[in-house]
Amino acid sequence: MKILGKHRPSKAIILAAGEGTRLKPITSSIPKPMIPLAGKPLLEHNILGLKNAGINELLIIVGYKKELIKGYFKDGQKFGLRIEYITQEEYRGTAHATGYAKEFVRDDTFLMMYGDIFVDQKAFQEIIKNFEKSKADGLISLLNVDNPQNYGIITLDSKNYVKEIIEKPSLDREVGNLANAGIYIFPSLIFDAIDETTLSKRNEYELTDSIEILINSYNKHIIGYIMRDIYWNDIGLPWQLLEVNEYILSTLKRKIEGKIEKNVIIKGDVYIGEGTIVKSGTYLRGPCYIGKKCIIGPNAFIRPSSSIQNNCHIGMSEIKNSIILSNTNIPHFNYIGDSIICDNVNLGAGTKIANLRFDDKTVKVSIKGTRINSPRNKLGAIIGANVKTGINVSIMCGKKIGENARIGPHTLVLEDVPKDVLYYHDPKSGIIRKELK
């Protein structure tokens, strides 16, 4: 008989191997867990929350662009943790991915989470506290959702133990609206259940099937913990990055480490990193984040919920509610609203991004070939790494520009632009697309 380890988890597993294809072109150059928000990768925000909850050993299951994750977090020493890595060689479902952790966990109770979600750091403390209080064998975190058909839905019995797991139920099924939030606490017996898990209809080994085996075959009690008043986001779509960025910046505290020239106005909570220079005539309205070694201004206007990473140049331009990644230049008479601009982008003078439809309807975005109606009536562009635009380019709302693309001067962008393409308007022939070698 297997002897179970201590009840309170001190180890955590993070599944961070996926490619995040729905977030392209952002994830074309960077894995989803490493997308920086307010100066820290998404994964770091969660790791700090785990540490504060008493986790001291961490295993990260990596895959896509693993070198960026391992190169940043290394052995975890700078975070006060011990971090190990295992590469997921095949993508065969969440149960298969979790199974890689068997030797790391051994006989301990452990916390497991998906690496592509963001949750307020206090959630981990609440989850562990409720697990210990319950004396259950495991825990699954839940949240109330308005659209249960898009989630894995959990039903609970009168003692709040998991009774049934229904993956994306049809609209006519009344199974409640408690969705799986992607954070679990398991006994080591979950690996025995994983070994017994068979392929699903999606031809994957599903963790939810393993949980049902743990409950039904091993008679274990998995408590459902409903997260209330705790921010959570699964960041499956580009605009959800803007939502998380807004939330993180709403908790920001004012800190100025850079140089501020005369005649600069700073209102609200603004973070300015070391080596950054804010030039005369600039107006900053918090909350906003500006990283290290940036040049802001002269006469720049940075509006609330803007997050600008390191080594950026924002000149006589306006930035509003946007995420600007490192080494990007937006120097001359540009407007960027409700947009995500990746690393090493250079916008020519007069390049502007529309973020509002004339009819005030929500903005549609193409995701993996399908037009999806975002919930936002203000949404700009998603621009991949290494893109350059010529002067006076106009980009319509909800458009995506693939990595390494070049947009010719005086071009109106009314459609998504593929990666590695020269895209420009010819006065005689209209739009021309040429592959770049």
Image: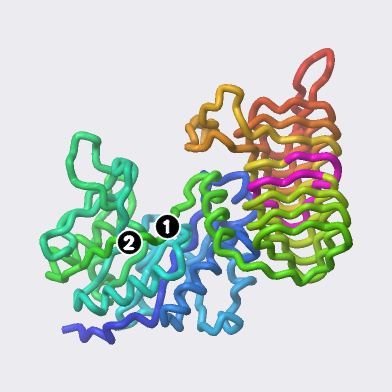
Placement of 322 over or under 309, stated as above or below = above
Residue 327 falls inside the magenta stretch: yes
What range of the chain is rendered magenta? 317-335
Image quarter where the C terminus lies is top right
In the image, taking residue 29 as reference, residue 220 lies left or right, namely left
From where the camera sits, is residue 437 visible?
A: no
| Coloring basis for residues | rainbow
Q: Is disc 1 placed on a helix, strand or loop?
A: strand
Mark 2 or mark 1: name the one nearer the start of the chain. Answer: 2
Query: Which of these two is toward me, 203 or 115?
Result: 115
Image quarter where the N terminus lies is bottom left
| Image disc number at residue 232 | 1
Query: Which of these two is toward me, 390 or 296?
Result: 296
Residue 264 falls inside the magenta stretch: no
Crowdedness near tag 1: few (<14), some (14–19) or many (≥20) residues, C-alpha within 10 Å: some
Crowdedness near tag 2: few (<14), some (14–19) or many (≥20) residues, C-alpha within 10 Å: some
Mark 2 touches mark 1? (CB < 8 Å):
yes
The image quadrant that residue 389 belongs to is top right
Q: Is disc 2 placed on a helix, strand or loop?
A: loop
In the image, taking residue 212 as reference, residue 236 lies left or right, namely right
- Location of mark 2 (residue): 227
Residue 287 placement (x, y as % from top left)? 63, 57
Residue 298 placement (x, y as % from top left)? 87, 52
